[in-house]
Amino acid sequence: MYDLGNIAVLGSGSWATAIAKMLLEKVDHLYWYMRRADAIEEFKRQGHNPSYLTSVRFDTDRITFTADINEVARACRTLVFVTPSPYLKNHLKKLKTKLHDHFIVTAIKGIVPDENLVCSEYFRVVYNVPDENLAVLGGPSHAEEVALSRLTYLTVGCADIEKAQALSETLASGYVKTKTSFDVIGIEYASVLKNVYAIAAGICNGLKYGDNFQSVLMANAVQETNRFLRAVYPIDRQVYDSVYLGDLLVTGYSNFSRNRVFGTMIGKGYSVKSAQIEMEMIAEGYYATKCMKDINRLYHVNMPILDAVYNILYERISPAIEIKLLTDSFR
């Protein structure tokens, strides 16, 4: 089986913390890159992430913390990126170490702004990482539930199935079940789109639409996802698998979903800026909406939910008017 070597988590948020928790169930030692040295010192002092998932305790003797991205790149073969997609480019600008021979895992459910590339494509195009060294981590998996050791299902996508299997087995535990897939691009785009659709679900929630309509919205969202994936990467996939449909449902319905919360605030009348300030967390779907709108100009897929969310967030069209038009298009 493929040897993952030393593993590093790059990121300091809730999902990065949850992934570190899962990995330390299996590996003896972990490298962890965080941008802020003061956050690292506070983590070491308290024994937990001072800002996210504070209930999860860590044996810090088993973790090498660093605020130097080059240190983890030199020390580790496997790099698990969990930074918000809008900040990925800035983190990587500091990198002097070549990534070609590293095993790059992206657990980022977003698109690199300005580039309009999902993260695996960004690493391939800009950093010349070959397909067999690129993996994605997907599936319905709220960090808050991982923190509570609640049953979670993950899918590792990679062109090299041996590498996918190695990572899959390393993440698996009594509360984490894993599987593998070849569909790297499909998993990534589905994980991006579900954030957009979760914003739509939140907007409808804020507008007081009920469960009946929410179910119709989700049904149309999975159809929209399937149309887009067939246009972009037409392979034989089951869009109703947990990594696609399951991720969509948990993000669209759960109160743990920051994208749904963000959308709910928009539906209640908040401006985008005021909602972002009050949340104090990144809603990836806000950035993904514009990127996906731009990308779809190349494919011309019928995506009325994406269009509606874009019009609300970027064209400042009234949520009540835009969602009413959307409801008239559903059956």
Image (cartoon, rainbow, N blue to C red):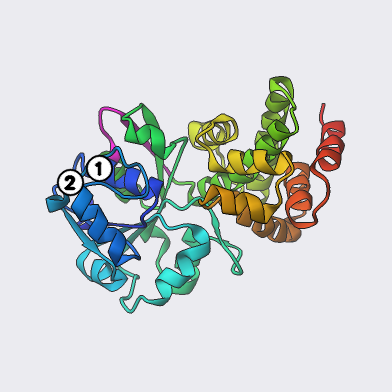
Q: Is residue 176 left or right of residue 89?
A: left
In depth, the one of 33 and 176 nearer the eye is 33
Calculate the distance from the C-alpha at mark 2 to the C-alpha at mark 1. Answer: 8 Å
Furthest-top residue in this view: 212
Residue 77 quadrant:
bottom left
Residue 198 against residue 289 in the figure, above or below: above
- The x, y position of residue 178, in whole percent, is 35, 35
Q: Residue at x 83, y 50 (%)?
A: 317
Q: Residue 262: in sight, yes or no?
A: yes
Question: Which residue type does callout 2 highlight?
Answer: Val
Question: Which residue type does callout 1 highlight?
Answer: Thr
- The x, y position of residue 261, in whole percent, is 59, 39
In depth, the one of 43 and 139 nearer the eye is 43
**Is label 2 or label 1 in front?**
2
In the image, which residues are magenta? Answer: 171-181
Residue 273 quadrant:
bottom right
